Image (tube, rainbow, N blue to C red):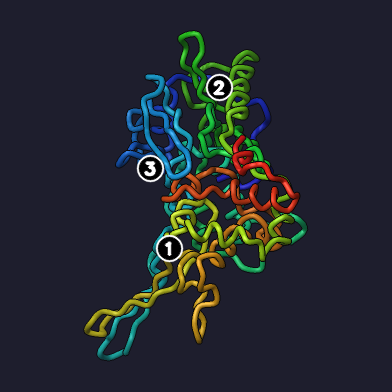
Amino acid sequence: MVHNDTNAAPAGHRLVVGRDGLDALIAALQGDGYAVIGPRVRDGAIAYEPVDSTADLPIGVIDEQDGGHYRLNTGPDETLFGYTVGPHSWKRALYPPRQSLWTAARDPEKGFTVEKPDDTPPRQAFLGVRPCELKALGIHDQVFGVQPHDGGHGAPQFTDQGYAARRATAFVVAVNCGRAGGTCFCTSMGGGPKAEGGYDLAITEINRNGWHDFLVEAGSEHGRAILDALPGRRAEVYDVQAAQAVTDAARGQMGRAMVPDVAGLLAKTLEHPRWDEVAKRCLSCANCTMVCPTCFCSTMEDVTDLAGERTERVRRWDSCFTLDFSYIHGGSIRQSTASRYRQWITHKLSTWHEQFGTSGCVGCGRCITWCPVGIDITEEARAIHDSTRGDAKGTDEGRA
């Protein structure tokens, strides 16, 4: 619901609730007509799916992440948000992997009749949006024309109407991070474990001296109205200080760090031999782009039944790692794995700034975790950085 700070509620409107307060929050959102989407354990990972109560959340679950490695483990018994991020991102709800644009059917009298699908946007409430994911939503708002671009780029020329409609009806409940994962590097990308705006409500989970509380802060007038209806008590100074200590601890646990001025670095090293080195490991599987919360490449398909009676035009996710993505008449422009990896990382970290006035990376670390061979975007940038400075140190310095 909130895309900027112009709708923000007055600062300091905070409430301390227990688990019953979060159940009341879910119930209140459902009563307001929202389908509540939140974190659940599914097939050994954290997935974002419909939830009806806190009993559906990953209670007592934490994740273990490294390059090409992901496991769920047992954490503190009562913790609801002890994980960091899984393979899913919130773009699935706002920019679905498959969208039907129109269908056509043969009519004996009228020829083909074309119909558009029902484009009424669903009312969705996102429960558990991490600060890095919140930043990714803001980036997509610029990409899809919901907000003006940063960096003096002005208002967007085009708006994706489907994305804009779904975004306008979304209610965002952010969750501040109490721990960082092994592949997290949000702080070096200008973010952090604490949400700084763009939410309706923000939650910080606090475990202290046997007490298990949730500090909930309103970020919009709608969020404040929901918050006022929850059972709880007004937050005191010591509650706010305890919540700050939670995110401060996470800030000091980053598993990775991006090199400074990576945009300028990559712009000057398009012919660096490191691209061929990483290509020897890269499988061009596109996992990194599929799990990325900001990648938005797509393709169009026209599908016709065998009888020729019905056809459908579909937009679906695609990836710059596929050979056909750069296909034009005569063949694909980027035929080598090295050129496709270079296209991805330089767009993500460098030329994205020219298009949208911001980086295309939020430091969530998903691309590192879900790469089958453990290719690390921070390590690759570090290797190029160190070689250009004549630095003989190993690339392990890319780790925090």
Distance (Cα) linking label 1 and label 2:
37 Å
* Foreground: disc 3 or disc 2: 3
Which residue carries the number 3 mark?
47
Distance (Cα) linking label 1 and label 3:
25 Å
Q: Could you classify mark 1 by the number of other residues whose Cα lies within 10 Å: few (under 14), some (14-19), or many (20 or more)?
A: few
Task: Tell me, yes or no, if residue 366 can be seen here.
Answer: yes
Proximity of marks 1 and 2: CB atoms separated by less than 8 Å: no
SS class, disc 1: loop
Give x and y (percent) for residue 92. Answer: 44, 53
Residue 79 sits in quarter = top left
Left or right side of 193 for 320: left
Which residue carries the number 1 mark?
119
Residue 248 sits in quarter = top right
Q: Quadrant of the C terminus?
A: top right
**Along the viewing direction, whichever of 26 and 177 lies nearer the viewer:** 177
- The structure residue drawn at horizontal position 64% and vertical position 34%, both measured from the top left corner, is 9
Give x and y (percent) for residue 158. Answer: 62, 68
Distance (Cα) linking label 3 and label 2:
28 Å
SS class, disc 2: strand
**Along the viewing direction, whichever of 104 and 186 lies nearer the viewer:** 186
- Of the residues shown, which amino acid type is indicated by label 2? Leu
Q: Quadrant of the N terminus?
A: top right
- Of the residues shown, which amino acid type is indicated by label 1? Asp
Give x and y (percent) for residue 75. Answer: 40, 23
Placement of 29 over or under 168, stated as above or below: above
Q: Which numbered dot is residue 15?
A: 2
**Chain-order first, disc 1 or disc 3:** 3
- The structure residue drawn at horizontal position 37% and vertical position 79%, both measured from the top left corner, is 114
**Chain-order first, disc 3 or disc 2:** 2
